[in-house]
Image (tube, rainbow, N blue to C red):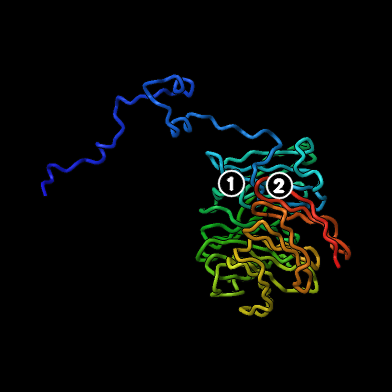
Amino acid sequence: MDYSKRVDMISAYMEPVSYQPPETLPELVKSTDYPNRNSLQYRLTEPVPLPENKLPSSLDLAAVNGAGNVIVAGNSYTDRLWGGGFCGWQNAADIGLEEKASFSRRCEALVTALCYTLDEALFVLGNDKGSIELWSTGNAVRGPGLYLVDNRYEHIGAITALDIFNGDERMILSGSMDGCIKRWDYSEGDLHSTSTLHHAHSAAITAVATDRNQSSLAVSCSHDQSAFVWDFRETKPAIALYEKHDAAFTTIRWCDESSWNRLVAIGDEAGRVFFIDTRQPNVFLETVACYDRKIHKISFHGKHFAVLGNTPEVKFFDEKSKEIHVEKSASNYVRDIIWDGKSDNNSVIACTVLGWDNYLKKLTIELK
């Protein structure tokens, strides 16, 4: 082979120096020397920002505090630059009404986790840049209004899970794509990590959940097909809840009802929900086949629970894991649920479900 005749592919396909297209969109439209290329027009077109008090089209997360105030976070997955935002309302009945929004905020990163703290005016937000943010909706000194209290970049990967501990100490638990779990203290007006478990899991953490009755216990699950119980009173806090499952775990929750004491519900990528007793690890007490695709979220309301997956459907179950209602009104993924009222109503349950394509619907389910 005569290598002297070899074509230099870099120089052959390099943009010539003489190629100097217009730098503005109006000039490009009038130019006959440089035909209108879609890619060039796309780069020159300025993105249109969302108006205030309006969420992106993909509603992903919701959080409710003890006073009934609601925060909804959404993300944009179709724009040139992916980003997120959140809005707050006084109650769930006002969700989606721009004129009744208490506050709103645009975010440059995707909002991946959201929860209220034990203080009704404070909430925590995680994003895909590994940042955990502590926000306040107002206090006696500064008055009403949204402001950032603290912001920490201590996770290498995106924040995938957040939950709060319900003890006297003001503690938050976070998990991320890098398999790291961190425990945060926000009692002094800022965020500082008190525990860091760099290799809590060998793959991305998909969910964390804290025990509602004991302030030192939490559970986590991961794409590494394992789930753990964490007791932060111990020097070595990890206890295997379930190992070597046949599919990746995608979500996990403690069961709220006192009669379900020590039970944990966990979902996987195969669309199944399992119940495990923390005192009897590696044993599924019950298996509920819900979907043919991954479980996205499990949400409890007294003796009832709802299961959301990568599907437009939402399935509701009673305390015997019997299906009582299937909601099929959505056209795209349903991502979160907000329960209305108290769980002691035995005749009806009400909730608000939200999802992509600006899906928002209030449901009332009569119990037979």
Give the CA distance from mark 1 to mark 2. Answer: 13 Å
Quadrant containing the C terminus is: bottom right
Give the percent coordinates (x, y) of residue 257: 79, 69
Q: Residue at x 61, y 66 (%)?
A: 292
Q: What residue type is labelled 2?
A: Val
Which of these two is toward me, 188 or 72?
A: 72
Q: Which amino acid does label 1 sit on?
A: Leu
Does residue 20 appear to the left or right of 173 in the view shown? left
Residue 100 visible in the current orientation = yes
Does residue 83 appear to the left or right of 186 in the view shown? left
Contact, mark 1 vs mark 2 (Cβ under 8 Å): no
Q: For mark 2, what is the residue?
A: 72
Q: For mark 1, what is the residue?
A: 110
Hey, which quadrant is residue 298 in on the image? Answer: bottom right
Circle 1 Cα neighbour tier, 10 Å, few/some/many (<14 / 14–19 / ≥20):
many
Q: In this view, does 347 lie above or below 59?
A: below
Does residue 176 appear to the left or right of 140 in the view shown? left
Q: Residue at x 63, y 78 (%)?
A: 281
Q: In this view, does 140 lie above or below 174?
A: above
